Image (cartoon, helix red, strand yellow):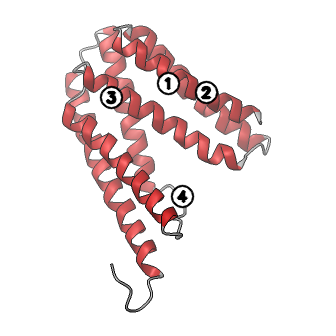
Amino acid sequence: MSIPNLITLGRVILVPVVFWLLLTGELQAAFLAFVLAGISDAIDGFLAKRFNWETELGAYLDPLADKLLIVCIFIALGVTGRLPSWLVILVVSRDILIIIAVVLSWLLEHPTPMKPLAISKMNTVAQIVLAGTVLADEAFALKLKGPVQLLTLLAAATTVASLVAYLRVWLRHMTVHETPGSKT
């Protein structure tokens, strides 16, 4: 177990803490925990690259930890009325659909390579910036209604674009090796 993987596991453990803090209205503490999670993500990535501590486990665990944090924050912000329900449903549904596609490809013995797309990276940034902005706005009464609305639309647009891009890649991958006469 490498140091970056331990830091990533710490971030995974932080997820239910952030979720609980949001649901109980401890918004300043939730914001600080969110910032801590972001700092830990930067540190584990730096250490893994700088000291060549990259591992196969880390390659899967790091993005999974990030996604788990974002999904939990979006759900908590949606449940508490701080984000629109339609956006929460869109974000969570995208991730569920991608997971279903990956699992289905494994079950069909044609695993899909896990490579992040540029639009997916943009989507992750948009979701993180939106979550952080909403958390900061709610925790410190910053009155950021306009920026939050703009970031909401950006997160929604990149979520849809990312889903479409992943589904195109998945469909292309899954249909490349079909044999003539196979039933779909």
Three-letter code for the amino acid on which mark 2 is drawn = Ser
Residue 39: tell me if it is visible. no
Three-letter code for the amino acid on which mark 3 is drawn = Ile
Q: Residues within 10 Å of mark 3 (few under 14, many from 20)?
A: many
Left or right: where 163 falls relative to 152: right
The nearer-to-camera label among 4 and 2 is 4
The nearer-to-camera label among 3 and 2 is 3
Gap between marks 2 and 1, in whole Å?
Answer: 13 Å
Is 82 placed above or below 9 here?
above
Residue at 26% x, 26% y is 78
Q: Residue furthest bottom?
A: 180
Residue at 41% x, 12% y is 21
Q: Earlier in the sequence, mark 2 or mark 1?
A: 1
Query: Under tag 4, what secondary structure?
Result: loop
**Front one among 19 and 117:** 19
Residue under pointer 2: 40
